[in-house]
Image (cartoon, helix red, strand yellow):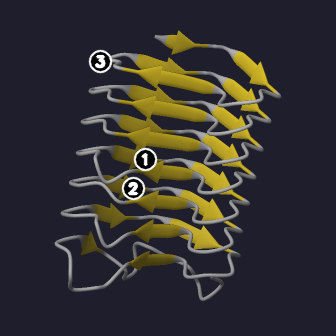
Amino acid sequence: NVIGNMVSDTGGGGIRVTGLKAGKISGNHVRGAGDVGIHVLGSSGFELDSNTVLSATASGIAVTNSDGGRVSANLIRLAGRNGIVIDPTSDGVLVLENTVSGSTEDGIQVSGKRCQLEANHISTSTFRGLHLTSTSDRCVYRSNAGRGGRGLGAACAAAGSTNDFCNEGTQNSSEGEN
């Protein structure tokens, strides 16, 4: 478990966890990481919740080659790339109730499989608030809100080419502001 740490102004990543099985990454504060703020690699059944990541040079939170984890109730601001990124080798990750603002690229970008994205709040991302890429498969997103970005509020890439369920109706909103 990685709980309650303060990490600031690193030349590299803030917190990097590899091979975590059913563990918790919670209550950490990362500021000014020179790479990814919090990076989870090769892990399963993890809970990454209630962390704050400010001004990471790369993505705020990255999940790589990991399965069955939960990314919830995190605050990510001013990420140099994506606020939260789930890579194509990850499967079954739940991204729930996170707040992401000021990302240089996408607020939340998902390329993994069988992921769920619910009740996230994304604002002022340069590209999209929420982006399911062309490699995402069988992902579901609902009840997310994107505001004030320059790109699309929420978008599934190459609509019709994946098996994602994109409930773009009344439950995902961008109010035309993205």
Q: Give the residue drawn at x 61%, y 30%.
A: 51
Identify whether 96 is placed above or below 134: above
Residue at mark 1 = 96
Residue 60 in the image: x percent, y percent? 62, 44
Q: Residue furthest front?
A: 11
Identify whether 142 is placed above or below 166: above
The reply to whether discs 2 and 1 touch (Cβ–Cβ < 8 Å) is: yes
Identify whether 73 is placed above or below 163: above
Discs 3/1, front? 3
Side (left or right) of 134 relative to 175: left
User: Which numbered disc, 2 or 3, marks the residue that appears first in the sequence?
Assistant: 3
Residue 90 in the image: x percent, y percent? 29, 45
Q: Give the residue drawn at x 71%, y 76%.
A: 148
Tag 3: residue type?
Ala
Residue 53 in the image: x percent, y percent? 68, 37
Side (left or right) of 96 relative to 112: right
Residue at mark 3 = 22
Residue at mark 2 = 118
User: Which numbered disc, 2 or 1, marks the residue that appears first in the sequence?
Assistant: 1
Quadrant including the C terminus: bottom right
